[in-house]
Amino acid sequence: MARTVLFADLRGSTALFGTLGNAQAAAIVTQTIGLLSRVVAQNGGKVVKTLGDGLMALFDGAPAAVHAAREMQDSIARIMAEADTGAAALRLYVAMAHGEIVEVAGDSFGDAVNVAARLLDHAGDNEVLITQQVHEQLAAVERQRFKSLERLHLRGRSEPCHVYRLESWYDDDAPPSTLFTDFTDTPLADCIRLAVSGEAQQVFTAQQTPIVVGRSPDSTFCIDDSRVSRLHARIEWHGGNFHLSDQSSNGSFVRFTGDTEIVVLRRGVCMLHGNGVIGLGATPADPRAACLHFEVFSYASQLPGTGS
């Protein structure tokens, strides 16, 4: 049976635990997941399972799933406002796909499940991403609320997937009143500077993505090192951000400038911001590692008179 699969992932809970302590943070997270589950049921969906700080749900059709995603975002904003913790807001990432589903022993399987799960890796803060199959089910007025991101390469899939991002929740032109910061005055990070230690740097714009990094001579950015896979990683731009997607055998390791923690990616995705270094096939702490230095910036901020 064809169903719409929705994955929702709540992020920011780690910061809550660090700021508020275990008891209060756990209460907020538990309350939020419970509320998201009720939103699913109120829109005719069924929660298949909860996944740590998120959930997977099934809907008979796309319109109900999209409406549920909107209510989820609004509900989280209300919870955080009522909690008045002074901590950073929780953020919800939502992804949907539509297709044939097989339900076995209380779980669900199928290509749509895999696509929705992989698509969630590409969602930015408070973003809702849907596939073309979901988009086609919506009424014309609802489809206009989505912006095409063209085709994204999802982990584990050979063929790219046409993806849309929800741009507007509301029926009027008034800006939504939520906890989440308005970044409209912030220059869009639409350029990335890449360089291997001791070599000339290269600058790529958002329009020049995806950037393929690997040992293959056909890569956009070729790095000749035995621990680097032929097609090691991809850098893509969507949602106003650059994302690094590891596709290698040995993994990618990201260290942001000023942070001691290293983000380990093994077939995973990480949003790149500011500047830092990417270890390809080995951690940047290894002096022999092939390291790719990066800096994300706005083209507009580099123009004369912008104060940069």
Image: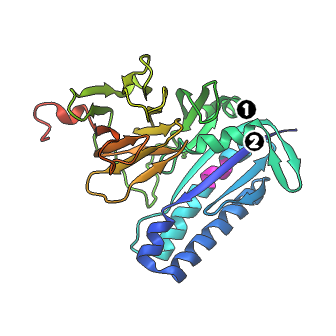
Of badges 2 and 1, the one in the foreground is: 2
Question: How far from the left and from the top, in percent, is residue 13?
Answer: 51, 66
SS for dot 2: strand
| Crowd tier of the residue under label 1, counting other residues whose Cα lies within 10 Å: few below 14, some 14–19, many 20 or above | some
Is residue 139 covered in magenta? no
Q: Is residue 144 visible?
A: no
Who is closer to the viewer here, 186 or 208? 208
Does any portion of residue 284 appear in the rendered image? yes
Q: Which residues are magenta?
A: 67-71
Within the magenta stretch, is there residue 68?
yes
Residue 4: image tag: 2
Image position of 278 with respect to 45: above or below: above
> Residue 191's x, y, as percent?
30, 32
Quarter of the rendering containing residue 190 = top left
Secondary structure under the numbered disc 1 in the rendered image: helix
86 left or right, relative to 202: right
Kindly identify which numbered label has been placed on residue 51: none
* Residue type indicated by callout 1: Gln
Q: Residue furthest bottom?
A: 23
**Amino acid type, label 2:** Thr
> Looking at the image, which residue is at 32% across and 59% down?
260
Residue 137 is marked as: 1
Circles 2, 1 touching at the beta carbon (< 8 Å)? yes
Q: CA distance from mark 2 to mark 1?
A: 10 Å
State which tag comes first along the sequence, 2 or 1: 2
Figure quadrant of the C terminus: top left
